[in-house]
Amino acid sequence: MPLALNPSRRAWLLTLSLAAMSGIAAAASDAAPKIDAPNVVPITPRLISAGQPTAAALGKLGAQGFGAVIYLAPPTSSDAVKGEAEIVRRQGLQFTNIPIEFNKPGPQDFADFEKAMAAAGDRKVLVHCQVNMRGSSMVFLHRVITGKEDPEVAYASVTKVWAPSGVWREFIVNTLRAHDVDFEPY
């Protein structure tokens, strides 16, 4: 039997429900990473991909609960942060650099990325490159191949940043096929 409520009680409950939902939304947005970097894409509370953070942002990662940083561009990139490894390690965070040549991603790059993710264990991880093209692509492959996530769902995070084409589209398709995953990026 449905619960009968008078109109004023119904309005009060609706107001209370909306207030609770606003509080939940505010708490969720407070939990989102606040990293001064381009194209920050939270994947889970423990995995975030992004473009190049500023030196100041890198210096705050430990306070934000990060335990590892995986940097996927050569440290000689024009907008790389000088001394990034030291900034990160001074906070007690694990730092790994996999200098993927943007025009030549290959199977060893993915293998190295998988090793770095495994070494990070249960730490909160920031995966970044310069703009989050390498990062979003490698995180996508990791989620699908290692995490066994639905490629369609995981690929939505890539499309927040870019639409891989050329060598990157080929790299993604070939890597998926090598791991028996049939998915064509759109």
Image (cartoon, grey):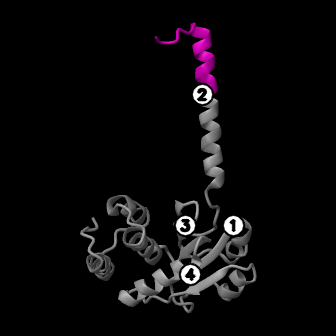
Three-letter amino acid code of the residue under disc 3: Leu
The location of residue 43, given as percent across then percent down, is 50, 62
Q: Is residue 7 magenta?
A: yes
Q: Residue at x 32, y 76 (%)?
A: 172
116 or 34, nearer to the observer: 116
Secondary structure predominantly adopted by residues drawn in magenta: helix
Q: What whole-number distance in Å separates the C-alpha atoms at marks 4 and 3?
A: 14 Å
* Sequence-wise first label, 1 or 2: 2
In this rendering, does residue 106 appear at all?
no
Three-letter amino acid code of the residue under disc 1: Gly
Residue bearing mark 2: 17
3 or 69, nearer to the observer: 3
Three-letter amino acid code of the residue under disc 4: Ala
Residue lying furthest bottom in this view?
76
Q: What whole-number distance in Å separates the C-alpha atoms at marks 1 and 4?
A: 17 Å
**SS type, badge 1:** loop
* Sequence-wise first label, 3 or 2: 2
Q: What whole-number distance in Å separates the C-alpha atoms at marks 2 and 4?
A: 43 Å
Q: What whole-number distance in Å separates the C-alpha atoms at marks 1 and 2?
A: 31 Å
Residue bearing mark 4: 119
58 or 97, nearer to the observer: 97
